[in-house]
Amino acid sequence: MSDGIFNPDWFSRPGDTISTLMSRRGLSAVGLAERLGCGRLQVRDILAGMTPIDEGLADGLAEAVGGTSSFWRKRQTTYDRCLSRAADAVPVKTADDWLRHIPLNGMVSSGWIERPAGRAQALRSCLAYFGVIDPSEWHRRYAAVCADVAFRTSPTFESSLGPLSAWLRQAEIGASMMSCAKWDRGALEASLGCLRKLSLLREPSKFLPRLQSICAEAGVAVVILRAPQGCRASGATRFVSPDRAMVVLSFRHLSEDHFWFTFFHEVGHVLLHGQSATFVDLDTAATDEREREANAFAATTLVPAARQGDMATLGGRSQHVLRFAASVGISPGIVVGQMQHQGLLGPANLNFLKRRYTWEAIEAALA
């Protein structure tokens, strides 16, 4: 690689080149942070384009991942120039209409972008964040990501797409930061029993790191990411490369039954539905056959098919539920959630058996 042969498209951020070189060298985000003498969040901001490459960072990147200092400075300059040209080409009304759908305040408060000073900077920041040349490319890319036909045809689709796309994009950035083996279907299938046992653990600090580690060994990056206001997604799945799948979970509702069902639903998508589609799962009735298949996979992973019928005999008595849960090796709260989902219990019955989470505990577990 030399300065004379580099010809990037404008939307190819310097972070994209850094990620490619990291992959070639087997260098993790933690490893890059150590070489640059910074923290993991700083590496995230570099890869996401929030931190521009100045002279000091250019020197550090040349040492850490290759190239020359002048190459990295030119890479940043070229990117900035092309980004500005693309932003200037977007008509004012088009930009304003698009930005109304984007959750700028939520993205700023979450640390995903810097607070923009005016519409022009907001447009630049959003084009850079999503890696698109204009709002029409953003719409083409994200309007097709949801496998749920009901979501695509709902009257709130346009207003929901902005928060959803921001969440998915941040999840992609998070997945790129994680160390993973290459995608291995057999390894993921073999790990289902271990993953299921994790649902017995009460504290996120006990099960989340292990869940992420087991999945990473099979080439699946599990990202835990709080959804911004307006995003109703519980989980999503896509292959971010031929060698890596991404599962993102929002901990929507903060209850164990919802979390574990969503997790195994997403795992079902990974195992059953190939690498071409992105699946976004909402709190709506499944209208797509692939969603029904993922639901069935999650249900029978949690409660084996041979024991599904037994739940109808439990009634609303907590002692029956406790004994059944112990016999199948899962938490009683998950059994309650499955019974409610199947209409065997009312939505208000036996909820005291469910474990609840807090974002403070979740974030501490991820730290």
Image: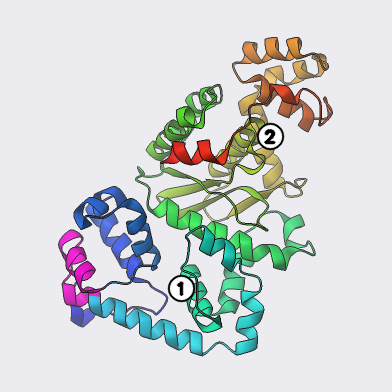
Q: In which quarter of the image is residue 140?
A: bottom right
Specify whether 178 is left or right of 331: left
Residue 185 visible, this orientation:
no
Q: Which mark is residue 296?
A: 2
Residue 68 on the magenta segment: yes
Label 1 is placed on what type of residue?
Ala
Asked if disc 1 and disc 2 are in contact, CB closer than 8 Å, the reply is: no
**In front: mark 1 or mark 2?**
1
Q: Which mark is residue 128?
A: 1
Percent position (x, y) of residue 309? 77, 19
Establish if 298 lies above or below 43. above
- What residue appears at the point 62 percent right and 20 percent down from the top-left corner? 331
Percent position (x, y) of residue 13? 37, 71
Residue 104 on the magenta segment: no
- What residue appears at the point 52 percent right and 46 percent down from the top-left corner? 247
Establish if 11 lies above or below 110. below
Q: Which mark is residue 92?
A: none
Locate the N terminus and report the quarter of the image it occupies: bottom left
Specify whether 100 is left or right of 134: right
Q: What stretch is highlighted in magenta?
A: 54-72
